[in-house]
Every structure is written in C-alpha cells, then in structure tokens.
Amino acid sequence: MTLRPDSPELADGAASWLSAYVHIPFCTRRCPYCDFAVVTPIETAVSHRAYIDALVVEINLVPDWGPLDAVSVGGGTPSLVDPELLGEVTRALDRRFGFRDDAEVALEANPEDWSPDRAAGLVAAGFRRVSFGAQSFDPDVLAALGRGHTPDDIGAAVAVARNAGFTSINLDLIFGTSGESKRSWEDSVDRAINLGVDHVSTYALTVERGTRLSKDILAGAPAPDPDDQADKYESAQHRLTEAGFVQYEVSNFAMEGHHVRYNLCTWAGGEYLGIGLGAHEHRDGVRARNLRRLDRYMEAVGERIRPRSGSETVNDREQEAAFLGLRRMAGVPLNATIEDFLGSDSGVRLAAAGVIAVDEGRLRISRPLLADAVMREFVG
Ligand SMILES: C[S@@+](CC[C@H](N)C(=O)[O-])C[C@H]1O[C@@H](n2cnc3c(N)ncnc32)[C@H](O)[C@@H]1O
Ligand code: SF4
C-alpha cells in the first residue's frame, strides 16, 4: 500500500532509512543568488574524471553500513557530468553498501544540459528520479536569475526524461524575484502542473550573504518583498493542491507515491552519508561536514582521509527531532521538549492564533506560510 506523502507513518518510518548524498560541484557559471559549494571552469583545473575518482575513494573510506534506501546526487550541476562517470559513483555505492530493491536513486539537473542520450545514459546508470532546476517559465525572470535555459527547454527536458524511463520528475521553482508579477508566478506554477510532473518544490528567493544578489541589493537593487512572497506562496499552495498534489513539507508537493525519500529521511532525523565537496552527514549521533574548498578536498582524499571540516555530537535528540520534523505537514509526535514549548508564552500564543495545533498526539504547523516564524520562536 502506498502511503500518502503527508502521512505520519511515512514521516516517522523514514527515521530508520539509510541514505547517501553525493555532491557534484561543477557549474557552467555561478548564478547570482547561489551560495552552494560550486566551482566554475575558470575557478578550477580539477577534471570531472579526477573528482569522480575522489568520490569513489571517499565512498570506500566510509565504515560499512546497511543497504541504502535512497541516494541523492545533487550540486552544483550533476547533469554536466558524463552519465558513465556518475554510473561509477552509483556502482561504488552499490558495491560498498548495497541498495534496497526499491531504492530511490535521484539526481539534480539543469534543463539546458539534457538530451535523449544523456537521459538514457543516466537511466542505464540506475537513476529513476530527476529534479530539474526550472525556477520560472518567464524569460525575464530566468534572465534576472542568470539562468542558461529558456521556458521551452523545461518542457523539452521533462518529455525527454519521461521517454528515457525516469519514473519521478520534479521541478524546482523560485518565487519573489525582482520584476516577477503575481501573474507571471501563477503562470509558472500552472505550466509546471500542465507538464504533468510528479513533484514540485517551491522556494522563496533567499538572499544569501556574499552572493552577487546580496551585493547588488546592498548597492540599491530591489530586495525580495516578504508580502509579495507570502501571496505567491499561498497561491502556489492553492494551485498545486487543486491539481492533486499533496503538500507534505513547507516547500514540497508530491503526487501520491512520489514523495522524496532522501528528504523524508533527513527531516525524520534519519542517517545519511555525505560524500563530496561540502557534503553534510548524520551518522551514529554525529553531524559532520566536508571541506568546501576543492583543492583541500582533493588533497585530503588523496591522503586517504575523510575530508572533514567539522563535526558535532547531537546532544538534544528531542529538540533536534522537533526542529527537523516540524516543517512536515505530518508534524512531530509530542515529546517533553514540545510539551515545554506548548506550555511557554510563545506556544500558548501561537496555538491561540491557530498557527500550531495538537492533534492525535502530534504537533503540527497549521499555516505553513508561518513555519519560519514558528521555528524562530521554538528555538528562541
Ligand atoms: C543548489 S541548486 C542545484 C540544482 C541545479 N544546479 C539548479 O541550479 O537548479 C538546488 C535548488 O536550490 C534552489 N535554490 C538555490 N539557491 C536558492 C536561493 N538563494 N533562494 C531560493 N532557492 C534557491 C533552486 O530552486 C535550485 O533548483
Ligand atoms: S543555482 Fe545551480 S546552476 Fe546555479 S550556481 Fe547554484 S548549483 Fe550552479
């Protein structure tokens, strides 16, 4: 039986899954809003071949583990790398840990890199889920975001992925770019729906420190408007749920059977390996991060040591479970930390305002739009 993406059984069961995240840092250029661990061709001489070899070495440095329920290859831009090379990574994971029969094997892709040959190669390498960084279907918004694809590239990429045998297709959309009208955003959401994709993630454009976007804003360019973003968030929620998507997390909407296992595992406090530049890991009660500088990462792996930049032991498991899990529509089971919050001034006020609610032994955020505000009060 397939569980609904927002069901508590699925949300809680994901805590026992084992996942792996593999980071591919290569990008053609740096988008003005992005602060992920990426490198562009002018910034590095490290070849794809050398980096993939390093990933395989790192995989073999990881102590043994059980079979994987989910693998997520993200970036950066994994779709820039030859599918044969990505296949070496999935095979190395399979040899080292094994995959469960129904394991999710997913990658992120930019629509402009996609072709029937590439898609077929990725299916041959074991990938069945693809997440395209569509962001918008408005050419002016795509230009403002510094993207390299056209609206038509998105539809073409989805059709090619389907024909090649991908069984779960996601589009990432960003709302609140300067110059984006409400109409333009609604049109983007509708076009995503009309393409018949299985999953949509909607992100408010966030101004990350140190990015070109943040420098432009400091120099006087318009910043995203929170009221505009709130309106757009709620209109996307409305349109996607009307179209049959189930919202199962603040930013994520899935058709039944198309929830992302890797994400559910991380939100449930489950364990995942972090392989590659800047990757994060949670294993044996320790959260660890990999180095973010490619030369240092390559050097460490070359010396056969795990390329860590830091780690900490998780001390307060209850608080962490609530912090990670509350953005899910399934909420979190009550525990002593949550009971304390419910009894605090903030908790009483938020419950009275109908922003949070307790139901069947779980705390849920009733208005996902206000999730960030609830989280601030929860940790504050
Ligand atoms: C890091 S990207 C990697 C995938 C791919 N390279 C791309 O650009 O689509 C993953 C997703 O994060 C989201 N994202 C990245 N930076 C963001 C920001 N500053 N604000 C909102 N969403 C962001 C985008 O929707 C993007 O598709
Ligand atoms: S948004 Fe995607 S394509 Fe752009 S720099 Fe970041 S990872 Fe690369």
Image (cartoon, grey):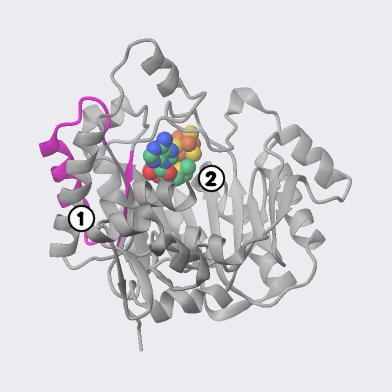
Nearer to me, 314 or 45: 314
Residue for point 35% across, 81% down: 3
Give SS at disc 1: helix
Give SS at disc 2: strand
**What's the amino acid at mark 1?**
Gln
Specify whether 10 is left or right of 23: left
- Residue 38 percent location from the top left of the image: 57, 35
Span highlighted in magenta in the image: 176-204
| Residue 237: numbered disc | 1
**What's the amino acid at mark 2?**
Gly
| Residue 75: numbered disc | 2
Compared with 27, 374 (above or below) is: below
Please say whether residue 262 is visible from this viewpoint. Answer: yes
Compared with 326, 209 (above or below) is: above
Task: Nearest to the eye among marks 1 and 2: give it.
Answer: 1
The CB of the residue at mark 2 lies under 8 Å from ligand 1 = yes
User: Was residue 181 drawn as part of the magenta stretch in this picture?
Assistant: yes
Which picture quadrant has residue 45?
top right
